[in-house]
Image: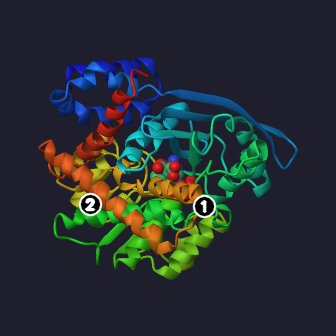
Amino acid sequence: MSKYVERVYNHVIEKNPAQPDFHQAVKEVLDSLMPVFEKEPRFEKYKILERITEPERIVIFRVPWVDDNGEIQVNRGMRVQFNSAIGPYKGGLRFHPSVNLGIIKFLGFEQIFKNSLTGLSMGGAKGGSDFDPKGKSDNEVMRFCQSLMTELFKYVGGRVDVPAGDIGVGAREIGYLFGTWKKITQRFEPVLTGKSLEYGGSLIRPEATGYGSVYFAQEMLKTRNEDLKGKVCLVSGSGNVAQYTTEKCIDLGAKVVTLSDSSGMVHDPDGVTKEKLEFVFELKNVKRGRIKEYAEKFGVEYYPDGQPWTIPGEIAFPSATQNEINNDEAKVLVDNGVIAVSEGANMPSTIEAIDVFLENKVLFGPGKAANAGGVSTSGLEMAQNFGFESWNRETVDDRLHKIMINIHKMAYDASKDYDDPGNYVLGANIAGFKKVANAMILQGHW
Ligand code: NDP
Ligand code: 2IT
């Protein structure tokens, strides 16, 4: 590590104890930036690293709500407004029992560079709660969302901070949150994205993260004269990102042989078809059941607590959660002949796993580039809302596709400029960082 990077990294660890996910996200970015500081010392002079690793604002608040039995429940809500140098704060909300400040800070930090790569005007933020939507009735979810927004509304707005979905937050939650914000503020503006179509949502937003991750994989494969046709793909998760990753893979003639959830993994050697995927949409989005039911319905193998990474495949799309691929799992993937990994999830590969992929020349698309299609299309949703327009599917999909091609190009070009062509970790971090850092310098010492 360079002295500057080492000093800042040690400071981050000291100032943010017990936040390992945040440390990991910072380390991955800072390691990539070392050659930048050698070439351009002004970033050190302006103390950009010290500033960019410190959120502009964090709010943490109590979220009390009443369950269906009349019992009062208390959760914790939070929003980390990390960086507004290039636009209003933007980033999802996660509802999951594991949520803590370190997780939301890692996600908010990643979001700064991801949003920069999209080429749109969006700063970085993330929020969420340790609320667990699993097993809750619609009314309970609604009361929880209403309570959360009666505090969060003070900090968000269409040109201030625009949350969206993430794990455990989909169209249902966004609707309840939007309705509450509108009721309190008497305003109708794009304070949230991922809205339903009836009140300002965008076509293709539900599909965008998964489609974008596959578009990114396509671009990586093109650099080796390869494509997706006939490739065996491993998808983890079975939520929003996993579902639309699978759909796009099928459309492009690839074969998805795995899906999973936090209970286990299904292996379908014949591949998920459009009909089977319909079952998954219904199972996960309507019935809110377990992926095990897929195995029962279609007579395939179910592995309790299993992960897709033991199954042979050529392209991996980790699309569930952070640190779902460790060093050993990365080695198994490589031994089994994986040629590309496109991270639909945020930080699904540990730093050691990334090293294994890079050492073995696997095409590796880091989350902040590969899954940027979701937030990009959120940006397109805001553009439509501010213009009182709604674009058709083809228009949005075409713009999403072009944005993903451009993100790939920016990351690839930066990796070439810094003498490691095809290292998308390096390229994405550098390209994402530079725009934000320069914007910070231009705006004075805030
Ligand atoms: P969903 O809530 O729709 O689905 C999450 C999926 O991942 C479920 O199958 C879930 O299983 C599984 N999962 C969640 N947590 C864990 C865990 N701790 N261990 C094992 N499996 C787990 O979320 P999304 O599909 O929206 O998000 C998936 C990933 O993609 C996240 O990393 C998110 O940050 C990232 N992402 C999402 C974007 C979006 O637009 N939605 C944009 C960019 C990135 P179970 O149901 O059992 O919990
Ligand atoms: O991680 C992410 O980029 C998201 N969850 C989507 C954020 C957004 O504002 O659409």
Q: Quadrant of residue 269?
A: bottom left
Residue 379 to residue 435: above or below: below
User: Is 150 left, or right, of 231 in this rendering?
Assistant: right
Q: Quadrant of residue 247?
A: bottom left
Find disc 2 in the rendering and name its residue.
Answer: 340
Residue at figure coordinates x 67%, y 53% from the top left:
173
Whether residue 86 appears in this view of the structure is yes
Residue at figure coordinates x 47%, y 35% from the top left:
84
Expressed as whole percent of the image width and height from the top left, the position of residue 182 reads 74, 48
Looking at the rendered image, the quarter that the N terminus falls into is top left
Query: Is label 1 in a helix, a strand or a loop?
Result: loop
Query: Is label 2 in a helix, a strand or a loop?
Result: strand
Question: Marks 1/2: CA distance?
Answer: 40 Å
**Amino acid on which the number 2 mark rests in the picture:** Ala
Given residues 228 and 92, the one toward you in this image is 92
Expressed as whole percent of the image width and height from the top left, the position of residue 266 reads 47, 67
Find disc 1 in the rendering and name its residue.
Answer: 388
Expressed as whole percent of the image width and height from the top left, the position of residue 230 reads 29, 78
Mark 2 residue CB less than 8 A from any atom of ligand 1: no
Residue at figure coordinates x 29%, y 46% from the top left:
428
The disc, 1 or 2, on the residue closer to the chain's N-terminal end is 2
Residue 355 to residue 11: above or below: below
Type of colouring: rainbow
Task: Say if mark 1 contacts mark 2, CB within 8 Å.
Answer: no
Dot 1 surroundings within 10 Å: few (below 14), some, or many (20 or more)? few
**Amino acid on which the number 1 mark rests in the picture:** Phe
